[in-house]
Image (spheres, rainbow, N blue to C red):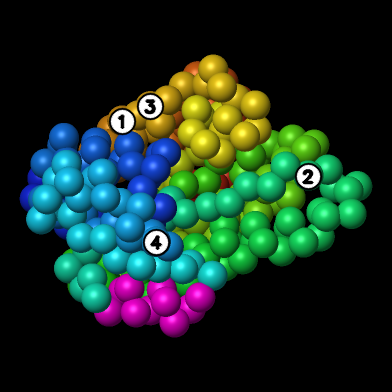
Amino acid sequence: MSYSLAGKVALVTGANRGIGKAIVEAFFDNGVAKIYLAVRNPENTQELQQQYGDKVVALPVDVTDEASVKALAEQTRDVEILVNNAGVMNLVSPLDEGAESALQQEFNVNVFGLLRTAQAFAPVLEANKGTLVQLNSIASIKTFGDMTTYSASKAASYSVTQGLREKLGEKGVSVLSVHPGPIATDMGKNAGFDDAPGAETVAAGIIEALKAGDFHLFPDPMAKQLEAAYQSYADDIILSEMSV
C-alpha cells in the first residue's frame, strides 16, 4: 500500500547528521509538514533549526534508556512517520578482546533501541495509521569480518523488523526495512568508505519506497547487487504467509 508524505508529521532519531539529516531534508522536499529531531544532544541540530525554523522541533532521546524513549513518545503523539535511524558501529574482529563489549553496545543501541522505540511508539502509530522506517544494512544479511559484531546486531534488528511488520501491520501500521551498503557518512568514512554514495541516495530511496508501499529498500549500487541475489528468497520466504 502506497504512502503519501504530504502534510505528514515525522520523527527522525539521529537526525543531526549523515543519513538522518539527509532524510529530514528529503522529507521537507516532499511535503512533510513537521519533523521532530530526536537526538542525544539537541544543540547539535542548530543548522537544521536555522534552516527550517518552527517546522522542526529538537528533542532529547537516548535509545539505550527506556524512560527516555517513553518520554519522547509522550511528547510526540502526532507522529505519523517514525524513522529509527540511530545506530552505532564498532570495527572489531570477532577474535579481538573487545569484541564482547562491542557487541553489547551495538545490541543495546541497534537492537534493543529499536525494540524500545517500537514499543513506545506503537500506540501513536496505530492511532495515526502511520509507518515505521527502520535503518538496517546489507550487514543484516551478509557478515563482514571486521564488522562482525555490527553485522550480528543488524541481523538481529532486521529480524525484529520482520516481526514488527507482522504485528504492527495488524494495527494498520506499515513498516519499511532499509538496507544500505557503504555510505559516505561519518560512520562510513570511519570504516574506510570515503568514495561511497552520499546519504542523499538513501533518503531518496526511502521516499520512493514509502510511495510504493515496499517493505525492503536496497538504495545504493552495492546494496542493489545484493538485492538481485536476495530478491527471490525475500519474496518467497520473508514476505510470504507461512504458518508455524
Span shown in magenta: 65-74
Q: Residue at x 42, y 76 (%)?
A: 68
Which badge, 2 or 4, is on the more N-terminal residue? 4
Disc sitting over residue 201 in the figure:
3
Q: Is residue 72 magenta?
A: yes
Q: Which residue is mark 4?
A: 41
> How far, Cα to Cα, is label 1 from label 3?
5 Å
Q: Nearer the viewer, mark 1 or mark 2?
A: 2
Position in image of residue 164 (x %, y %)? 46, 62
Residue at mark 1: 204
Amino acid carrying label 2: it is Val
Image coordinates for residue 21, horizontal then vertical, percent: 33, 42
Question: Which secondary structure lies at badge 2?
Answer: loop
Q: How far across and down, in percent of the image, does residue 196 sit?
A: 52, 21
Mark 4 or 1, nearer chain start: 4
Q: Callout 4, which amino acid?
A: Asn
The residue tagged 2 is 92
In percent of the image, x 52 and y 46: which residue is there?
136
Left or right, 96 with reference to 130? right
Q: Give the position of the C terminus as an image quadrant.
A: bottom right
Provide the secondary structure element on which disc 1 rests.
Answer: helix
Determine whether 66 is above or below 137 in the image.
below
